[in-house]
DNA sequence: TTAATTAAGGATACATTTGTCTTCAATTAA
DNA sequence: TTAATTGAAGACAAATGTATCCTTAATTAA
């Protein structure tokens, strides 16, 4: 559904929001390791989300890193999509038509019109905080490393 | 949501199903014009869907072209996604995780789990015929050309 | 029958976008 | 001043999108 850029971004933001703070900033190393993403590519993505402190805050130098303010954690998930210009993924016509609407529906429109609003609602009305607090307060799954592994694999 | 490949494929199949038949096969020219897609790229995509008459039938030579059998029109839309190996777009985890499940949920899982089945249902249980007959029997919108255009644009 | 014509099939080249890494500059704490 | 850390630019790689050219198959006309 989303590009890798967006997948990594969503995971990274959620991770930073959960485990980072002004007192405990998270470096790009730990972040990319935790969310199973290529380090330098992730760095580039975070730059976009950090620009003008749009969503993520960052500090350079020793003990520097990334974190989210309490205010930023109230942002919707859509905010992330917008900053990466991928919000159209969930807003546009399934068949990729410009003019698909109630008056000018594509063949899938009348089916999809019941699903799309739910997708939009999920991204627009759920805040980063919402998603984190709804889960139990222990840990969150943001990578592909299974917590329990077999000996042989 | 989908790649251009898939968007064009969905549009093309719907168009061919609606306007093509053994007696009236449709050439790549008319098809790509009707669905607003690059001709040669569309040809390549149709090749995949025509391979082994998996979904589309084709005939070369004069009066040749593409069409769908009555049987093929009973296929689900998912069939198209599968042939293009893009069915994971609607089946995988929103955050792109391998292990996202009820036991090992990503932060969006419990929200998205109500939406995903609807998407899957739409593609798996709606046949090409279903989508075409649900619309009025006049014409279908499959391109970006507005039927009514202003003089100046 | 054969040749010419019309269509799809297939291979391949090219372009663009997306994903990834490398290198160096800027910043800040100690 | 030095070491740690993000920022920014650019090189490179891989995937996706697009065009070109030639081959193959079917029809039609000679």
Image (cartoon, coloured by chain):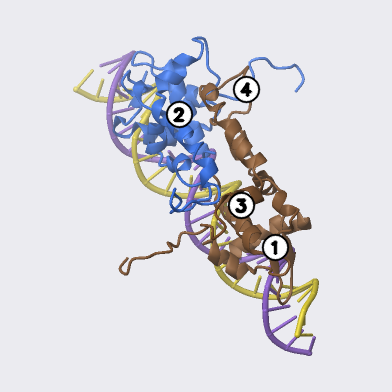
Chain colours: A brown, B blue, C yellow, D purple
Q: Are marks 1 and 2 in contact (CB under 8 Å)?
A: no
Q: Nearer the viewer, mark 2 or mark 4?
A: 2
Q: Earlier in the sequence, mark 4 or mark 3?
A: 4
Mark 1 crowd level (few <14, some 14–19, many ≥20, 10 Å Cα): many
Which dot, 1 or 2, sits closer to the camera? 1
Badge nearest the viewer, 4 or 3: 3
Task: Indicate left or right for B30 with A126 as reference.
Answer: left
Which chain letter matches label 1? A
Q: Nearer the viewer, residue A13 or B114?
A: B114
> Residue A96's mark?
none
- Mark 1–mark 2 distance (CA, rounded to whole Å): 40 Å
Q: Give me the C-alpha separation between circle 4 and circle 1.
A: 40 Å
C-alpha gap between disc 2 and disc 4: 18 Å
Question: CA separation, marks 3 and 1?
Answer: 17 Å
According to the picture, the residue beneath numbered tag 3 turns out to be A133
Q: SS class of the residue under badge 4?
A: loop
Residue under circle 2? B122
Q: Position of residue A123 (x, y in %)?
A: 63, 41
Where does residue A93 sit, x and y in percent of width and height? Answer: 58, 30
The nearer-to-camera label among 3 and 1 is 3
Query: Residue at label 1?
Result: A67
Q: Earlier in the sequence, mark 3 or mark 1?
A: 1
Distance of mark 4 from mark 3, alpha carbons?
A: 36 Å
Alpha carbon of mark 3 to alpha carbon of mark 2: how far? 31 Å
Q: Are marks 1 and 2 on the same chain?
A: no
Which residue has dot 4 on it? A101
Please check whether the numbered discs 2 and 4 fall on a single chain. Answer: no
Q: Does label 2 lie on the same chain as label 3?
A: no
């Amino acid at each position: 559904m989303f590009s890798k850029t967006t997948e990594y971004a969503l995971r990274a933001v959620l991770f930073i929001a959960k485990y980072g703070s002004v007192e405990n900033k998270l470096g790009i190393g730990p972040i990319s390791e935790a969310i199973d993403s290529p380090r330098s590519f992730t760095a580039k993505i975070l730059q976009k989300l950090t620009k003008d402190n749009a969503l993520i805050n960052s500090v350079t130098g020793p003990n520097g890193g990334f974190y989210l303010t309490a205010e930023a954690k109230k942002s919707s998930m859509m905010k992330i999509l917008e900053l990466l210009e991928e919000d159209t993924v969930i807003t546009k016509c399934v068949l990729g038509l410009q003019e698909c609407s109630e008056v000018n529906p594509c063949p899938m429109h009348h089916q999809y019109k019941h699903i799309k609003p739910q997708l939009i609602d999920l991204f627009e009305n759920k805040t980063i905080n919402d998603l984190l607090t709804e889960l139990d307060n222990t840990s969150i799954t943001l990578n592909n490393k299974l917590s329990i592994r077999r000996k042989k694999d």
